[in-house]
Image (cartoon, rainbow, N blue to C red):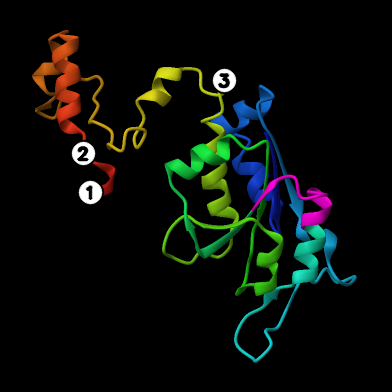
Amino acid sequence: MKIDVLTLFPEMIDQALSYSIPNRAQEKGHASVKAHQLRHWAIDKHGNVDDTPYGGGPGMILRVDVADAALEAVDHGHTAHRVMLSPDGDQFDQKMAEEFSKKEALVFLCGRYEGFDARIEEYVDQKVSIGPYVLSGGELPTLVIIDSILRLIPGVLGNVASLAEETFETDLTEYPQYTRPNIYKGKGIPDILLTGHHAEIAKWRLSKRRSASNR
């Protein structure tokens, strides 16, 4: 999988994805993630990529000509699935993560300031949000999405069973888990987990899971 990220803060992307599973996915050759500085496509020598909104109002708006040039440069011919991070986009969930993990190429466009020129939507395939709230920019949502999809690519996780039993895979939340010490400050763990009776343990775990839609 090839992933390109268009952002004013490529260091945020590079640093965050240089650890743990995202880094493993890249080292194993399962994915290639590259962050691009949006200012490479600035309109002037000062590196401006935004402008004041028509009609007045606070903040600055990412320019459509800058976004179009950047998207065309990293995805010439529009062969990748282009994603724009926006609070009013489609709600990201596990189903979308699975769909994205099957794409050959993805491009994420991260906004800052007050947002995007509305015409930019003509140059992307989908607007996506990770929740009904506003962040300073699209970098953190992009990292959340990339982390969630890289781990779904076959061969990335060392233990396939971990993926099969994960939260939301069956629309159920994870069951409570415990490890040593079995007693800590007077509080122990459920006796069933010490019996070694795997069928009963599995039944207990299922009883402790609840629908993700009711969480």
Is 72 inside the magenta-drawn segment?
yes
The answer to whether mark 2 and mark 1 are in CB contact below 8 A is: yes
Q: Quadrant of residue 56?
A: bottom right
Residue shown at 9%/28% (left/top)? 186
Which residue is labeled 2 in the image? 210
Residue shown at 63%/38% (left/top)? 103
Three-letter amino acid code at the position of disc 3: Gly
Residue 31: image tag:
none
Is 27 inside the magenta-drawn segment?
no
Front residue (pair 16, 79): 79
Give the alpha-carbon distance from disc 2 to disc 1, as whole Å.
7 Å
Q: Is residue 84 above or below residue 32?
A: below
- What residue span does the magenta drawing correspond to? 71-82
Q: Position of residue 67 (x, y in %)?
A: 75, 64
Which mark is first along the chain, 2 or 3? 3
Three-letter amino acid code at the position of disc 2: Arg
Question: For numbered disc 1, what is the local secondary structure?
Answer: helix
